[in-house]
Image: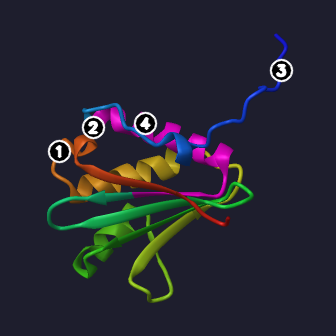
Amino acid sequence: MVLHPLEERVVSLVEDGLVLHTHHDPELLTELCGALCRMIIDHNCQLEFRTGGAPQCRVSLQVDTVGNLEASVTADPAELDELIELGWERADGDGELRSSWDDPVSVANPAGLVLATLQRFAVPPIATKLEITMTNVFA
């Protein structure tokens, strides 16, 4: 097989828009892995998930110009200890917890952490209740 360059401009994930096609939580991990792979290919993008209802949670994933992935979570301070048990690390006292993975990233670990975090805060099925924002960064 011979690969040839496209004659047209490649559409980024931000321009294309992220749509989760699953309505079932067990399939959400696969979709998160796919979104992270696409982010790593595109670079310079940020994906944010927000859970509706109470308690609220915001998970942000950002891929830099090299392909490193940084994730952060903002939640009720009463939930921080449980989030640390899931694998998040304390940041410098700014109320956020963080985790990071250097390039090359194996997407299974960050996707699993994000899914476990979202499952902690949202009532199933969470796949249909997430608010998703995708943006370009480092422009």
Q: Point out the stretch of residues depicted in magenta.
A: 25-48
Give how far across and how far down residue 24 sits, in percent: 25, 32
Q: Nearer the viewer, residue 65 or 55?
A: 65
Residue beneath disc 3: 4
Kind of residue indicated by mark 4: Glu
The earlier-in-sequence mark between 4 and 3 is 3
Where residue 17 appears, as percent x and y from the top left, is 47, 43
Residue appearing at x 31%, y 31% in the figure: 22
Q: Residues within 10 Å of mark 1 (few under 14, many from 20)?
A: few
Quadrant of image for the C terminus: bottom right
Label 2, label 4: how far apart the Cα atoms are? 10 Å
Label 4 or label 3, whichever lies nearer to me, is 3
Residue 18, above or below 79: above
* CA distance for labels 1 and 3: 44 Å
Q: Which residue is mark 2?
A: 25
Mark-to-mark CA distance, 4 and 3: 28 Å
- Mark closer to the chain start, 2 or 4: 2
- Of labels 2 and 1, earlier in sequence is 2
| Number of numbered discs on residues | 4
**The residue tagged with tag 1: helix, strand or loop?**
loop
- Residue 58 spot, x, y in % from top left: 34, 65
Say which amino acid is labelled 1.
Pro
> Residue at point 52% right, 39% down?
16
The numbered disc on residue 124 is 1
Element on which disc 3 rests: loop
The residue that mark 4 highlights is 31
Q: Is residue 72 above or below residue 30?
A: below
Q: Secondary structure at mark 2?
A: helix
Tag 2 near tag 1, CB within 8 Å: yes
Name the foreground residue: 43 vs 105: 43
